Image: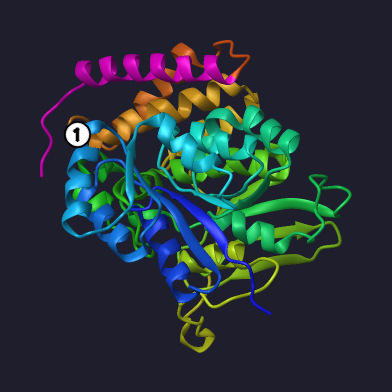
């Protein structure tokens, strides 16, 4: 009996999650069909993917990128229709022809198309942290109200998802869970002297020791803001308060996260640091299917170590914990928006590495207590924070070494 193909829209197809998703899809052509691929402005890369997978639609950020992509595809005789803009992203995420959406657009730009997918009752493979960090309350309400299916792709949340009972319904006590444990590699500066942090360069900061990721998420890993955003994300995914979530530094990136049960048991998901594993797990549910990842060789492991994070080394993680404890939707939006501006400014060598936390802290002091009551007001706040963060960058701009 032939299995019905799952029709996919992949938001953020040219990023690392998008590429890994398409790699898994290519290994199982009988199970999946690509309906739409989206990218911001990486026209050449998106054109190559369209030539390979021939989606019905491709979506880019603006008309200029769309014209360039159309010319590339016409020259290659690829029939994919090219669209552009935020409305087009929402359209391909909510189309009646689509079964599931990989939500992998980096940043707050991924919120609206993910929301459109939720309102259209799609299966959502969530790889965009900001959807929950910026709009968690409203996004989860849409998921529950419209009957969407939400599956976490981030390796840590996916590991927790695999380690919880299959019928987990958001009640830690009913599931016998004491706490959730998110692991973190500690990034490239785990053992760097604190006095040397001010001189860290973007080139050094993007060199993650274990994972191959984009520049923005690599910087977030180096500051551990990535883990802070994941804590906020886990709060919404698993209905877990800050007091029942732990972070442990685990440099080997073998144990991807754990669930501590009330009887003293701890269940962990382990594997090589390869995003195709959580992607294949979610795409294949309820079955397990091959991902292409190398098997974990226990005999080759020299040891697994764990330690509590030092907030002096990772002040961004402390800021995220403070936001989580405050349980204020405005504060998490401010945290994310200010961090995006700060990371972009650091990558452009306009501010220093230690300025990232300083900028975020300043933004929280100014905007953290703002009142928001709907997703539109959250997006307005997001714009305000970005504007004031840009002013902070201009006022603190300094020439940095290469």
Task: Report x, y in % for residue 65.
Answer: 22, 39
Q: Is residue 348 above or below residue 287?
A: above
**Magenta stretch containing residue 108, yes or no?**
no
Q: Which residue is mark 1?
A: 64
Tell whether position 390 is magenta.
yes
Residue 313, given in percent of the width and then of the height, sits at 41, 43
Vertical placement of 23 versus 308: above or below? below
- In percent of width and height, residue 143 lies at 68, 38
Looking at this view, is 391 or 309 the one in front?
A: 391
* 222 sits left or right of 70 in the view: right
Viewer-nearest residue: 379 or 44: 44
Above-or-below relation of 310 to 164: above
- In the picture, which quadrant includes the C terminus? top left
Q: Is residue 375 left or right of residue 29?
A: right
Residue 198 left/right relative to 25: left
Q: Residue at x 86, y 47 (%)?
A: 173
Q: Residue at x 27, y 34 (%)?
A: 344
For the record, the magenta segment spans 375-402
Q: Is residue 307 visible?
A: no
Position in image of residue 263 (x %, y %)? 86, 62
Residue 244 falls in image quadrant: top right
Taking depth in this image into account, of 202 and 119 the one nearest to the observer is: 119
Q: Name the quadrant containing residue 370.
A: top right
The foreground one among 183 and 79 is 79
């Amino acid at each position: 009996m032939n299995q019905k193909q799952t029709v996919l829209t992949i938001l953020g197809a040219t990023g690392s999650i998008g590429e890994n998703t398409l790699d898994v899809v290519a290994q199982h052509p009988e199970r999946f069909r690509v309906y739409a691929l989206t990218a911001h402005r990486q026209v050449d890369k998106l054109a190559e993917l369209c030539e390979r997978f021939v989606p019905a639609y491709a979506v880019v950020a603006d008309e200029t990128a769309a014209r360039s992509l159309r010319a590339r595809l016409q020259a290659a005789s690829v029939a994919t229709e090219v669209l552009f803009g935020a409305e087009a992203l929402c359209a391909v995420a909510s189309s009646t022809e689509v079964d599931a959406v990989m939500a992998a657009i980096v940043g707050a730009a991924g919120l609206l198309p993910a929301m459109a997918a939720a309102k259209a009752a799609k299966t959502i493979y969530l790889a965009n942290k900001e959807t929950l960090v910026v709009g968690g309350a409203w996004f989860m309400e849409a998921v529950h109200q419209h009957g969407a299916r939400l599956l976490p792709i981030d390796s840590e949340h996916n590991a927790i998802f695999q380690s919880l009972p299959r019928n987990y319904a958001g009640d830690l006590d009913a599931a016998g869970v004491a706490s959730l444990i998110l692991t973190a590699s500690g990034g490239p500066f785990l053992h760097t002297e604190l006095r040397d942090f001010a001189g860290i360069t973007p080139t050094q900061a993007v060199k993650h020791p274990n994972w191959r990721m984009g520049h923005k998420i690599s910087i977030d890993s180096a500051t551990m803001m990535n883990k802070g955003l994941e804590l906020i994300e886990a709060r919404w995914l698993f209905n877990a308060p800050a007091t029942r979530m732990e972070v442990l530094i685990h440099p080997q990136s073998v144990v991807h996260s754990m669930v501590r049960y009330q009887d003293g048991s701890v269940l962990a998901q382990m594997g090589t640091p390869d995003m195709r594993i959580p992607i294949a797990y979610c795409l294949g549910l309820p079955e397990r299917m091959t991902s292409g990842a190398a098997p974990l060789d226990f005999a080759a492991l020299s040891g697994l170590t764990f330690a509590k994070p030092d907030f002096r080394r990772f002040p961004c993680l402390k800021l995220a914990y403070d936001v989580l404890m405050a349980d204020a939707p405005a504060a998490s939006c401010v945290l994310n928006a200010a961090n995006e501006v700060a990371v972009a400014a650091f990558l452009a060598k306009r501010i220093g590495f230690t300025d990232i936390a300083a900028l975020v802290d300043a933004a929280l002091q100014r905007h953290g207590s703002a009142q928001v009551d709907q997703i539109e007001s959250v997006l307005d706040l997001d714009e305000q924070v970005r504007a004031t963060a840009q002013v902070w960058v201009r006022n603190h701009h300094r020439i940095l070494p290469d």
